[in-house]
Amino acid sequence: MCVLFFAHQTHPSYRLVFAGNRDEAYARPATPAGWWNEHADVLAGRDLDAGGTWLGVTRYRRWSVVTNVRDLPAHRPRNRSRGELTTTFLLGEEPPEKYARRVFSERNEFNPFNLIVGDERAVWIVSTHTNAPLELASGVYGLSNATLDDPWPKVVRGKAAFADVLKGDEPDPEACLDFLHDDHRASDDDLPETGVGLETERRLSPLFIASDRYGTRASSVILLNESRGRFVERTYASGGKLGGTVAFDF
């Protein structure tokens, strides 16, 4: 997951409204969102390479999402998979605070990441690039491959579009999927400098990325309140070709 937006306890109808894109190499095998056969309470996609997930929710309204932090010098090929971080939370019962603090103590075993974990009581974020885990106050947040609310062009642009979605009593998943498909490239003056070179910064600057080898693989929307949840996901193949759309109510 490389860019995401969420409203935590700010919408009148939902305690969580989430919209995000997972960007990944098209060759990396994965399954789309679905209920897991061996863990019937977990609804998530699955990375078939390492076995974890980038985003998921449970019938008990626990949810978790991870993004990479773009810090190439800190990357170690033999580190543990970051998809393990989300999966372990979804399968467990630890409160978000306890889990976030435990992950923070183990953060050096993983390549750079941001992890968000939440349940009906609280939402916490833990990162390899901050000084401590943090409980999030009610608010609207954006996150890409830097720290929370770092004003990368795609984060600023996406938060503005997300704010429009949040104006109604019933957020429209289709409207979320539409703004997540925005392929506008940022101007060179606005691009971050993350060590990948100008051409790559340009290619990665839109909310929706499409190329031959790497791009947006899935756009996901989650709505949660005290009595129900909704998960909608749209998948894409090489070059941004539309795959399929699935929707789950629980």
Image (cartoon, helix red, strand yellow):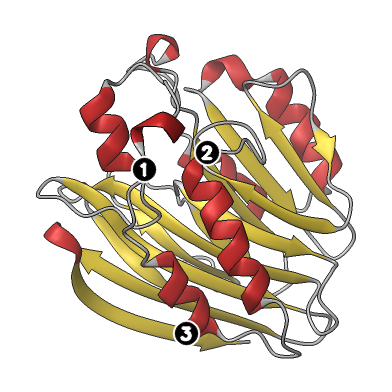
Residue 8 picture location, percent across and down? 79, 62
Which residue type does callout 1 highlight?
Ser
Disc 1 and disc 2 in contact, CB within 8 angstroms:
yes
Residue 189 seen in the current view: yes
- Mark identifier at residue 174: 3
Q: Amino acid at mark 3?
A: Glu
Tell me the residue that label 2 is attached to. 152
Residue of label 1: 205
Which callout, 3 or 2, points at the residue further toward the start of the chain? Answer: 2
- State if disc 2 and disc 3 touch (CB < 8 Å): no
Say whether residue 37 is visible. no
Assign a secondary structure to mark 1: loop
The picture places residue 102, in percent across and down from the top left corner, at 75, 28
From this view, report whether residue 22 is shown above or below residue 8: above
Q: Disc 3 vs disc 1: which is toward the camera?
A: 1
Mark closest to the chain's N terminus, 1 or 2: 2
Left or right placement of residue 46 versus residue 8 in this view: left
Q: Position of residue 151 (x, y in %)?
A: 60, 38
* Numbered disc in front, either 3 or 2: 2
Q: CA distance from mark 1 to mark 2?
A: 8 Å
Give the residue at x 55% y 61%: 56
Q: Looking at the picture, tell me which residue is in the foreground, 116 or 188.
A: 188
